[in-house]
Amino acid sequence: MHNYALALILLALVSASTLSGCSPSWDVVQASGPPSALQGVGDFVIRTDYSGTVVDGNRESVYAAEELEEPEQQEHWAKAKELMDAGVLERIAQLSPQVRFELAQGERGDAQGPEILVEYISVQPGYWGFFSKEALVIARVSFVVDGQVTDQISVEAEVNASRYNPTVVDRLANIGRQIGHCGAQFLNEAQSGE
């Protein structure tokens, strides 16, 4: 009976890790303060940027034009990017309810207010076909106050292909939530003075 209970616990742990994919890892590249420049900031524009993104060894624009030959593949890629961006916003807003957020796209703008800029450095979406592969994304999350990058983290997030994440769209949406989770964790720590 003891072995049966142990086997069930191990199965539950393996299932939980399969559902969530691998945990993202992140490193602080730059931190302001003390006190943090992010303390007391209440509104952010979250901007996502693919202008410097490398996808499977090619610039994102080249990947989309040359590697995705079928219109359906191009539609799926556009949807995957849209859901990855939405996942970032969703998770940051969920985990940092004290702050209001708005989503925008493109390079850092001349916005007057604070921004969180998510630059996707490298994206390995995995395979589109029957033999799926894990997706891996490296992103840089920069916090901009008064037009200056005050804080920055680097995030590496991976989601395994599974029956719960069977498509590239599913895996990248989950990666977006992982990136948002890391950004929210950093923001909350900075704002609390930890």
Image (cartoon, helix red, strand yellow):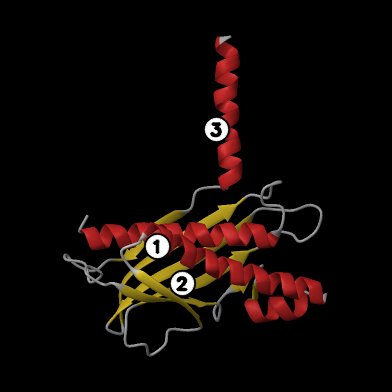
Return the disc, 2 or 1, that comes first in the chain's sequence.
Answer: 2
Question: Which residue occupies 48% across, 63% down?
Answer: 90
Question: Which residue occupies 69% across, 80% down?
Answer: 62
Question: Which residue occupies 47% across, 84% down?
Answer: 107
Question: Which residue occupies 56% across, 40% down?
Answer: 17
Left or right, 42 with reference to 66: left
Residue 193 lies in quadrant: bottom left
- Percent x, y for residue 129? 80, 58
Q: Which residue is mark 3?
A: 13
For residue 69, say whether it is visible. Answer: no
Name the image quarter holding the N terminus.
Answer: top right
- Percent x, y for residue 65? 74, 81
Left or right, 112 with reference to 40: right
Q: Residues within 10 Å of mark 2 (few under 14, many from 20)?
A: many
Q: Secondary structure at mark 2?
A: strand
Q: Amino acid at mark 3?
A: Leu
Return the disc, 2 or 3, that comes first in the chain's sequence.
Answer: 3
Q: Which residue is mark 2?
A: 118
**Residue 82, relative to residue 163: is it above or below?**
below
Q: Residue furthest left?
A: 35
Left or right, 146 with reference to 141: left
- Percent x, y for residue 120? 52, 71
Residue 4 lies in quadrant: top right
Q: Secondary structure at mark 1?
A: helix
Residue 63 lies in quadrant: bottom right
Q: Amino acid at mark 1?
A: Gly
Q: Secondary structure at mark 3?
A: helix
Q: Residues within 10 Å of mark 1 (few under 14, many from 20)?
A: many
- Mark 1 and mark 3: span between their CA atoms? 26 Å
